[in-house]
């Protein structure tokens, strides 16, 4: 189980570093906990690298009307830099700005965000916008990014996002979620048909799926077993 769980952590680390997973193959024997710690260190280092410059941009944006800042953000800054700036903005100002950004740009920006740094912003966003951005991420196959945000939005929001998703997609999403307890309330809100699809898809993920199932609440495990 450890090797396969480490594989998932390497996928997450590669995403954080914007590199191909093959470049991190030498970490395959590293424990999942150590890889998770390394990911946190990398995330902090990448954010801190240009922190003073990013804070300067955030200060400038505060002096401009939100509509003007939004236009500059989409045309001149791009998703990656915008994500860095968002992480240091006042949550109220950032949420106001987000309301002027196009949903497709917010989805691209989300790929570069650390959800733990923008949880306050997400809490202030209109739920319909959060759901639309989430569905765009799902449609584009950004399941890892979506998994990171699943831990900082209410279960009912996650359920709206995955409405219509296949059992295989939801299982892959669950495998990428850092805290398995987040999965339980989402499973509780899914139809029996979808949960049955998830149960069927676990066979394709072997021991990684077994590890996830073992971490779920007893009620969730029992329901999956009854629908297998």
Image: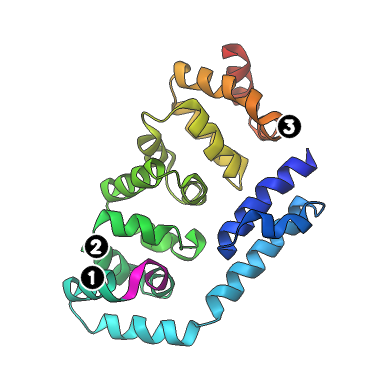
Residue 80 falls inside the magenta stretch: yes
Q: Which residue is mark 2?
A: 101
Q: Which residues are magenta?
A: 77-82
Residue 81 falls inside the magenta stretch: yes
Q: Residue 175 at x, y = what percent? A: 60, 39
**Quick one: label 2 or label 3, which is nearer the N terminus?**
2
Q: Are marks 2 and 3 in contact (CB under 8 Å)?
A: no
Q: Which residue is mark 1?
A: 70
Whether residue 163 is situated above or below residue 38 in the rendered picture: above
Q: Residue 85 at x, y = what percent? A: 39, 75
Give the secondary structure at mark 2. Answer: loop
Q: Are marks 2 and 1 in contact (CB under 8 Å)?
A: yes
Mark 2 vs mark 3, CA separation in Å: 41 Å
Q: Is residue 182 left or right of residue 225?
A: left
Q: Which residue is mark 3?
A: 207
Give the secondary structure at mark 3. Answer: helix
Give the secondary structure at mark 1. Answer: helix
Give the class, few, some or many, for how many residues have Cα within 10 Å of label 3's Cα (few <14, many ≥20).
some
Q: At 57% across and 45% down in the image, what residue appears?
A: 177
Mark 3 vs mark 1, CA separation in Å: 45 Å
Q: Residue 94 at x, y = what percent? A: 32, 69
Magenta stretch secondary structure, dominant? helix
Whether residue 76 is situated above or below residue 24 in the rendered picture: below
Whether residue 187 is situated above or below residue 59 in the rendered picture: above
């Amino acid at each position: 189980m450890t090797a396969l769980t480490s594989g998932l952590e390497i996928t997450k680390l590669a995403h954080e570093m914007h590199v191909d997973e093959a470049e991190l193959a030498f970490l395959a024997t590293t424990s999942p906990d150590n890889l998770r710690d390394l990911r946190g260190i990398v995330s902090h280092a990448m954010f801190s690298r240009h922190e003073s410059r990013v804070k300067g941009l955030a200060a400038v944006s505060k002096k401009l009307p939100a509509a003007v800042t939004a236009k500059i953000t989409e045309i001149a800054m791009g998703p990656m830099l915008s994500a860095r700036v968002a992480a240091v903005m006042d949550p109220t100002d950032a949420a106001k700005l987000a309301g002027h950004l196009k949903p497709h740009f917010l989805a691209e920006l989300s790929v570069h965000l650390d959800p733990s740094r923008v949880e306050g912003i997400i809490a202030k966003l209109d739920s319909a916008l959060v759901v639309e951005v989430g569905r765009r991420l799902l449609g584009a196959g950004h399941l890892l990014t979506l998994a990171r945000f699943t831990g900082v939005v209410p279960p009912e929001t996650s359920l709206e996002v995955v409405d219509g998703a296949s059992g295989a997609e939801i299982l892959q999403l669950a495998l990428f979620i850092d805290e398995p307890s987040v999965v339980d309330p989402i499973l509780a809100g899914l139809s029996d048909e979808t949960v049955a699809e998830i149960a069927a898809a676990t066979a394709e993920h072997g021991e990684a799926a077994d590890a996830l199932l073992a971490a779920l609440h007893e009620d969730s495990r029992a329901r999956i077993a009854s629908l297998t």
